[in-house]
Image: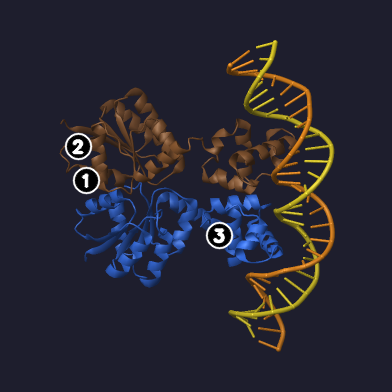
Chain colours: A blue, B brown, C orange, D yellow
DNA sequence: TATTCTCTCGGTCTCTAGTCTGAGTTAAAA
DNA sequence: TTTTAACTCAGACTAGAGACCGAGAGAATA
């Protein structure tokens, strides 16, 4: 088997160094680069064209999800392993939809991560047991999340609501009439199956739709 | 100078291994143990009595803040360096109040962390620039965070708001009249300096007051 | 071309939210 | 004992939220 070219994208220096140091003992894996932000990661990956990418989700500049999407669009053969600090309901599926190949937690051991890298290079994906459980329950209830039915404009309005704006303020911000805002708000409330804007704001925050 | 005995408490295997591997090249530092949870960390520290502890804040079992408090109560000479994944308004001060000696981010380089360990053993504390900035602004405006001024009842009401309840629903849940609820809501809005319940709900979520 | 979707806006109506003022109760602190 | 703070509730009022109905313009699709 050829050497696996790997890029690590994580804003934590210690994590990058930790993985890199550990993987140096693995002869079949060659760490060809590291990046500390999503944007930097995309650039690096497009330049190095690695076989596998270890990608953190929570980073200060540019989310890992956006980076994952950009990379898979341009390099469909590049396997991206999401490596995140915690188990987050709302980010598993967006990440997988963005084209992530495997999904692991940082609580995994270094050995497990090395194994996941090799498997990814081999075309096998690894999903953390906890995450896999979520996927099963999602398959059992395959309905889309309510907010996926929102139109672009409605999502904009929802985010305004999530920021605590009144209808009048949304009207000014989006350059539309208050009546129109009310129409959108009403549609959003129905689609999200909530009773009022406060619940909509909570929904937006809990589902990670903000910003 | 004697060798510095260090314990690492972090639920991320890669972080522990990363720091440990890096610090092995430092002759003056001896990693005498690792723990993957707060409770486990307390036990280990009480047993090993290290000079310095590197402590993660976000862990699945037992928060780093509780662990920090327990350790400093029993071993006041043990220097605890908080090492956290992100810059969180709400956890800096509780951690420092719990007796943390230094406060660093995982975005710090491995060199910086090694330096912080040595400084801690020497009695010098290191506070991340960003965190230090927060401290300065706290000193400049020593007022408590708005929500700390809330009474117990008002906090209960705020959490209900954060859960999307209407005044009528809060009234039922807390067994008080709607008029009373309105009074509490009004007080909450003033104290938090927000205009309406939606903004209050957002506040509650952003400041981590929910649950 | 006909249809569908999205975004836009209007009118009317009801109800909730929130403000303000005032006030009684209890419990703890000075 | 007096004072203070927290919790309770009332009435009256204004303004915003949201429901419901209808409708026109533009773009995309069948």
- B37 sits to left or right of B176: left
Q: Quickly name the residue at label 1.
A: B22
Q: Label 3: which residue?
A: A142
Q: Secondary structure at mark 1?
A: helix
Residue A95 located left or right of residue A22: right
Labels 2 and 1 touching (C-beta < 8 A):
no
Callouts 1 and 3 on one subunit:
no
Quadrant in which residue B74 is drawn: top left
**Measured from the top left, where is residue A23 in percent x and y?**
23, 54
Residue beneath the point at 67% across and 36% down: B184
For image coordinates 45% across by 42% down, the residue present is: B89
What secondary structure is found at the residue carrying circle 3?
loop
Separation of marks 2 and 3 at Cα, in angstroms:
53 Å
Both on one chain, marks 2 and 1? yes
Callout 2 secondary element: strand
Real-space CA distance between mark 1 and mark 3, rounded to the nearest whole angstrom: 46 Å
In the rendered view, tell whether residue C19 sits above or below residue A90: above
Q: Earlier in the sequence, mark 2 or mark 1?
A: 1
**Frontmost residue, A58 versus A148:** A58
Q: Which mark is residue B29?
A: 2
């Amino acid at each position: 088997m050829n050497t696996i070219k790997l890029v690590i994208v994580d804003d934590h220096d210690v994590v990058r160094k930790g993985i890199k140091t550990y993987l140096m003992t693995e002869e079949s894996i060659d760490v060809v680069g590291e990046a500390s932000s999503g944007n930097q990661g995309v650039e690096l990956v497009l330049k190095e064209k690695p076989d596998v990418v270890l990608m953190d989700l929570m980073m200060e500049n540019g989310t890992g999800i956006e980076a994952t999407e950009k990379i898979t669009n341009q390099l469909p053969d590049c396997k991206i392993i999401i490596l995140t600090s915690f188990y987050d309901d709302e980010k598993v599926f967006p990440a997988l939809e963005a084209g992530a190949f495997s999904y692991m937690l940082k609580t995994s051991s270094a050995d497990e991560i090395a194994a996941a890298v090799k498997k990814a290079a081999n075309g096998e994906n690894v999903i953390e047991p906890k995450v896999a459980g979520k996927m099963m329950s999602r398959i059992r209830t395959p309905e889309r999340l309510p907010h996926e039915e929102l139109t672009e404009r409605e999502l904009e309005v929802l985010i305004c609501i999530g920021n605590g704006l009144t209808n009048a303020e949304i009207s000014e911000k989006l350059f539309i009439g208050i009546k129109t805002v009310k129409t959108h708000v009403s549609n959003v409330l129905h689609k999200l199956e909530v009773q009022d804007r406060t619940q909509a704001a909570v929904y937006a925050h809990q589902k990670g739709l903000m910003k």
